């Protein structure tokens, strides 16, 4: 899948997880609204926004939304895209371990890949959908988010221009009330005051350069005390940084515009923001001023000339229904009570745990390996002989070997399908119930695949010196092995990344696949294996005792060995007799680490001298010789 599809799936997973948190907070808001400080409820909505925008979670062994199970939407298996092997960057990704189907894709295969299913697990319930549907949904999501962001930006720019055109003279009473309010609330910088016909009630607007907006003639309708209450409310929004918080919530709405619960959360958060601002004003007022403040809110609403529909703004009046609740909370306000704060702190702490933690994933634990002390490299030996180990250690090692051999002998093999890919016999089999692909020469732990007979549908396994085991198909399974035509085989054999030893044996299984292998459906596992096979690699997966291992092999190994030897022989034959002698004499020799130190030093010096002769030969190659030398796979170069 493309990057935008991965981002879309991550946004859906975050939105799904946050939906439960929103429902929990709505329920807590209804039940505990008289026992929780409004500021704590507003902090809970900010935590929801943070959960929607930040995917990082702290793993914990127990989680209330899933005991050991991840309550999220996640892909169980993703089909790999098909690309051209000659495309830029594909060879580098092949060397990095990315399994791409090589070569151009036929129209019928491309049409089939467009409708391939992507499997998801939602609370352990498997859900499937097509790749094309996911891609279309991702584009719709991106278009919706971009459209909302564009509309918000246009609205802010238009409002800024209109405020400049409709700006009126500032009343002295308003200016004096703002200066006094800043001193009362401890605001070091006085915000800019704008009197305009764009607003019906006072409001605070602007994140980086906040402005106090007042309707024209607003001060003439209020007394000095009433004007002071209105100004203190707007300055309380500034002191609490509510504009920044509202922007944070709106960003969550833009990213998760498809989730109606997110919009509900933003609306309720705006209501709780006003209640928290009222509580903030009352904490800085005198003990008996709550009634005057409530009467001021009623008077402002009664004389308001219209509502405010401004982007990124907060005001003193947000609607008649909310105003009734605010008046009730103002009348019930009790200064210095700790119970609402403590209950709110417990609620917020619980939401932090639920929203910012996730159940631990099942990790693949590597078997413990007893460390063996390593001596000086120039010492007679690199590790002590086995007879120098303690009796207890020898007994542990012997018991571990016996246990491992018993498990390997008890392994169950079930041959399911045999076919040919590019003329190479390939078998699909179950190992302890897990699907895996093998070719001749594959290793399944201590077992070796000795032969595969496509005609007789048989597979021969060998375990050390024991008699061979011949497997036959007992439960035929229809499997569509990928087709690789001869021209594609030739293209792969010309690919240095495919010929190189390192490109095969350094291929690693993605960590996400390792951790999720036990929960992936069987058809998805087979799809992953066949995608590797389509790219020319056989990944023999073995899942046992919560550990997974793989034996990667290239599909056309005899042809690969022949191609590599031919390229190396062609380069050697292009050298002169003296160059051949110097080049061959420069091959790295083995240093006897059990020899005395002076012998090892002599061997090391001789090896450096041979390496210098070979380096000189490579440095003085002709252009034709260098082209042949560069064609040698890196694994064959000294």
Image (cartoon, grey):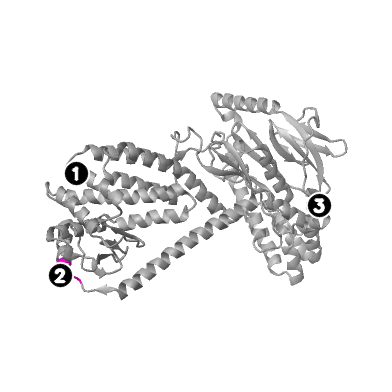
What x and y, as percent, mark residue 417? Answer: 79, 37
Label 3: element kind: helix
The one of 10 and 441 positioned closer to us in this rendering: 10
Residue 172 disc label: 2
Answer whether residue 38 is visible to the viewer in this image: yes
- What's the distance in space between the residues labelled 2 and 1, CA to CA? 32 Å
Image point 27% across, 61% down: which residue? 203
Which is in the foreground here, disc 1 or disc 3? 1
Mark earlier in primary sequence (2, 1): 2
What x and y, as percent, mark residue 164? Answer: 31, 74
Position above or below: 44 against 637 = above
Crowding near the residue tagged with mark 1, few <14, some 14–19, many ≥20 C-alpha atoms within 10 Å: few
Bounds of the magenta segment = 170-174
The one of 165 and 476 positioned closer to us in this rendering: 165
Which is in the foreground here, disc 2 or disc 3? 2
- What's the distance in space between the residues labelled 2 and 3, CA to CA? 92 Å
Tag 3 residue: 559
Count of labels in the image: 3
170 left or right, relative to 21 = left
Tag 1 residue: 331
- What's the distance in space between the residues labelled 1 and 3, CA to CA? 88 Å
What x and y, as percent, mark residue 355? Answer: 41, 42
Label 2: element kind: helix
71 left or right, relative to 583 = left
Image point 64% across, 59% down: which residue? 92
Label 1: element kind: helix
Q: Quadrant of the C terminus?
A: bottom right
579 left or right, relative to 282 = right
């Amino acid at each position: 899948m493309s990057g935008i599809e991965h981002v879309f799936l991550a946004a859906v997973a975050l939105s799904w997880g946050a939906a439960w948190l929103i429902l929990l907070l709505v329920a807590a808001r209804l039940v505990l609204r008289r026992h929780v400080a409004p500021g704590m409820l507003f902090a809970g909505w900010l935590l929801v926004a943070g959960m929607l925008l930040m995917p990082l979670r702290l793993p914990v062994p127990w989680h209330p939304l899933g005991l050991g199970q991840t309550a999220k939407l996640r892909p169980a298996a993703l089909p790999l895209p098909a690309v051209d092997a000659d495309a830029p960057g594909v060879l580098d990704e092949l060397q990095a371990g990315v399994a791409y189907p090589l070569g151009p894709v036929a129209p019928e295969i491309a049409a089939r890949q467009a409708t391939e299913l992507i499997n998801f697990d939602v609370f352990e319930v498997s859900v499937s959908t097509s790749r094309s549907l996911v891609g279309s949904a991702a584009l719709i999501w991106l278009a919706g988010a971009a459209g909302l962001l564009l509309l918000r930006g246009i609205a802010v720019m238009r409002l800024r221009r209109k405020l400049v055109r409709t700006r009126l003279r500032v009343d002295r009473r308003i200016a004096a009330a703002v200066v006094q309010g800043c001193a009362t609330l401890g605001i070091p910088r006085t915000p800019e005051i704008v009197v305009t016909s764009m607003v019906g009630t006072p409001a605070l607007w602007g994140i980086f350069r906040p402005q106090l907006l007042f309707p024209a003639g607003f001060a003439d309708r209020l007394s000095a005390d009433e004007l002071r209450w209105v100004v203190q409310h707007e300055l309380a929004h500034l002191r609490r940084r509510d504009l920044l918080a509202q922007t944070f919530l709106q960003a969550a709405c833009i990213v998760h515009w498809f989730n109606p619960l997110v919009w509900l959360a933003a609306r309720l958060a705006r209501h709780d923001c006003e209640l928290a601002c009222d509580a903030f004003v009352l904490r800085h007022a005198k003990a008996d001023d709550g009634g005057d403040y409530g009467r001021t809110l009623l008077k402002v609403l009664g004389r308001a000339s219209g509502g405010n529909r401004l982007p990124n703004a907060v005001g003193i009046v947000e609607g008649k229904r909310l105003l009734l609740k605010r008046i009730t909370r103002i009348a019930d306000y009790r200064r210095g009570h700790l119970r609402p704060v403590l209950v709110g702190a417990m609620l917020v702490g619980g939401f932090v745990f639920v929203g910012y933690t996730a159940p631990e994933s099942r990790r693949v634990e590597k078997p413990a390996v007893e460390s063996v002390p390593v001596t000086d490299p120039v010492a007679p030996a690199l590790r002590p002989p086995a007879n120098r180990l303690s009796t207890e250690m020898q007994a542990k090692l012997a018991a571990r070997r016996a246990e491992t051999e018993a498990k390997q002998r008890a392994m169950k093999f079930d041959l399911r399908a045999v076919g040919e890919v590019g003329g190479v016999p390939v078998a699909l089999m179950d190992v302890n119930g897990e699907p895996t692909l093998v070719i001749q020469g594959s290793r399944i732990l201590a077992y070796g695949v000795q032969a595969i007979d496509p005609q007789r549908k048989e597979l021969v396994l060998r375990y050390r010196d024991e008699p061979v085991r011949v497997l036959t198909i007992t439960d035929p399974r229809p499997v569509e092995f990928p087709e690789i035509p001869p021209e594609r085989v030739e293209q792969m054999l010309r690919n240095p990344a495919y010929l190189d030893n390192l490109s095969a044996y350094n291929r690693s299984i993605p960590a996400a696949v390792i951790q999720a292998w036990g929960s992936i459906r069987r058809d998805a596992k087979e799809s992953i294996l066949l995608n590797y096979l389509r790219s020319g690699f056989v990944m023999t997966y073995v899942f046992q005792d919560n550990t997974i291992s793989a034996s990667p092999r290239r599909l056309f190994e005899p042809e690969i060995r022949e191609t590599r030897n031919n390229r190396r022989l062609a380069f050697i034959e292009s050298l002169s007799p003296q160059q051949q002698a110097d080049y061959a004499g420069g091959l790295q020799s083995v240093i006897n680490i059990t020899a005395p130190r002076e012998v090892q030093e002599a061997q090391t010096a001789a090896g450096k001298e041979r390496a210098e002769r070979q380096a000189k030969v490579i440095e003085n190659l002709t252009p034709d010789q260098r082209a042949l030398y560069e064609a040698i796979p890196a694994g064959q170069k000294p």
